[in-house]
Image (cartoon, grey):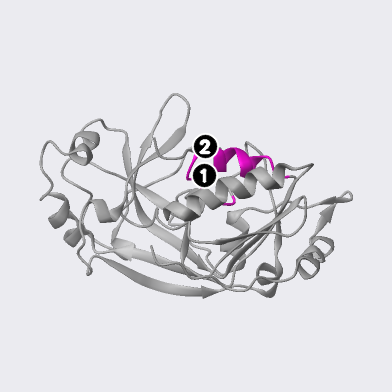
């Protein structure tokens, strides 16, 4: 995968944003990707709770997820490119400009139960991001992506009946991202205790090397890690139910079968 990086802001400039974040009873208010979407002008979630999987190269419209009904966990099963290479299926619907607050940095929730800052492309990355003490995240803009579902279904029906994607759809627990939001100008500043930043950098570097994550990773001190990318990275998507015949055709306001993500959904790396 072609790699492209951008220069990162200085640690001191981003660290100052912690003081500017709102406080409640002396505690810094924690943010997440919902706040980024709302503060970048994305207000219509189509009456459905999106699945927030964290900054990732893939996971856009057409990516398929399996839901474990017992645990509420989501597992990625395939990407749009596993279905077709056709270029006229996906389209950019609109672009949203983010406020200065989001561009300067928001103090994100971190921990095992928080929505991931970065998509956990591996178990090591999942553990490394969850072990961070704090996370300051900034983005430049957000783009909304949609699809022409009649065209998608044309390609979906061409898949062999015995393909893993078709067999998975028959299980009744497959959901497809029907609308997605991707960010530009991603930057995250993570702080750790002890030498945990070193192991986090090693985990992230290994994914960059394989092309699973397109970002620049920089260790700025013994406990501070910077992640930045100039690429478009998906952060969230609204789900639709996937059947063996595909999804309901139509686009925009004609789509009415959005499926809310489960509460406190846990996002998992590929199996």
- Left or right, 33 with respect to 65, comes to right
What residue is pinned by disc 2?
123
- Left or right, 178 with respect to 89, comes to right
Tell me the residue at 36%/71% (across/down).
92
The quarter of the picture where residue 165 lies is top left
Q: What's drawn in magenta, residue-wise?
A: 117-132
Residue farthest top in this picture? 70
Name the element at disc 1. Answer: loop
Where 171 falls versus 120 (above or below)? above
Task: Tell me how far mark 2 sits from mark 1, CA to CA.
Answer: 7 Å
Tell me the residue at 16%/39% (across/down).
163
- Asked if labels 1 and 2 touch by Cβ distance under 8 angstroms, the answer is yes
Name the element at disc 2. Answer: helix
Between residue 174 and residue 11, name the one nearer to us: 11
Give how far across and how far down residue 265 sits, in percent: 51, 38
Give how far across and how far down residue 236 sits, in percent: 47, 54
Between residue 211 and residue 106, name the one nearer to us: 211
Where 130 falls versus 237 (above or below)? above
User: Which mark identifies residue 120?
Assistant: 1
Residue farthest right in this picture? 26
The quarter of the picture where residue 12 lies is bottom right
Q: Can you say which quadrant of the picture contains the C terminus?
A: top left
102 magenta-colored: no
The quarter of the picture where residue 62 lies is bottom left
Q: Residues within 10 Å of mark 2 (few under 14, many from 20)?
A: few
Q: Residues within 10 Å of mark 1 (few under 14, many from 20)?
A: many
């Amino acid at each position: 995968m072609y790699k492209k990086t951008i220069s990162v802001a200085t640690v001191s400039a981003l660290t100052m944003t912690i003081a500017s974040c709102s406080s409640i009873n002396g505690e810094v208010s924690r943010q997440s990707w919902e706040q980024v979407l709302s503060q970048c002008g994305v207000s219509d979630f189509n009456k459905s709770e999106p699945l927030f999987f964290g900054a990732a190269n893939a996971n856009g419209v057409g990516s398929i997820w399996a839901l474990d009904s017992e645990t509420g966990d989501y597992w990625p099963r395939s990407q749009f490119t596993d279905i077709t290479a056709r270029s006229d299926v996906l389209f950019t619907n609109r672009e949203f400009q983010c406020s200065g607050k989001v561009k300067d940095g928001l103090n994100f929730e971190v921990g095992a139960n928080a929505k991931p800052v970065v998509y956990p492309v591996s178990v090591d990355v999942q553990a490394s991001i969850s072990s961070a003490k704090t996370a300051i995240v900034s983005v430049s803009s957000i783009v909304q992506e949609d699809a022409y579902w009649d065209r998608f279904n044309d390609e979906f029906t061409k898949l062999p009946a015995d393909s893993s994607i078709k067999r998975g759809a028959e299980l009744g627990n497959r959901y497809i991202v029907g609308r997605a939001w991707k960010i530009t100008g991603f930057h995250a500043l993570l702080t750790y205790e002890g030498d945990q930043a070193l192991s986090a950098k090693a985990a992230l570097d290994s994914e960059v090397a394989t092309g699973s994550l397109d970002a620049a990773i920089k260790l700025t001190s013994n406990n501070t890690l910077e992640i930045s990318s100039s690429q478009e990275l998906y952060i969230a998507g609204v789900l639709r139910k996937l059947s063996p015949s595909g999804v309901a055709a139509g686009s925009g306001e004609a789509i009415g079968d959005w499926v809310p993500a489960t509460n406190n959904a846990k996002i998992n790396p590929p199996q």
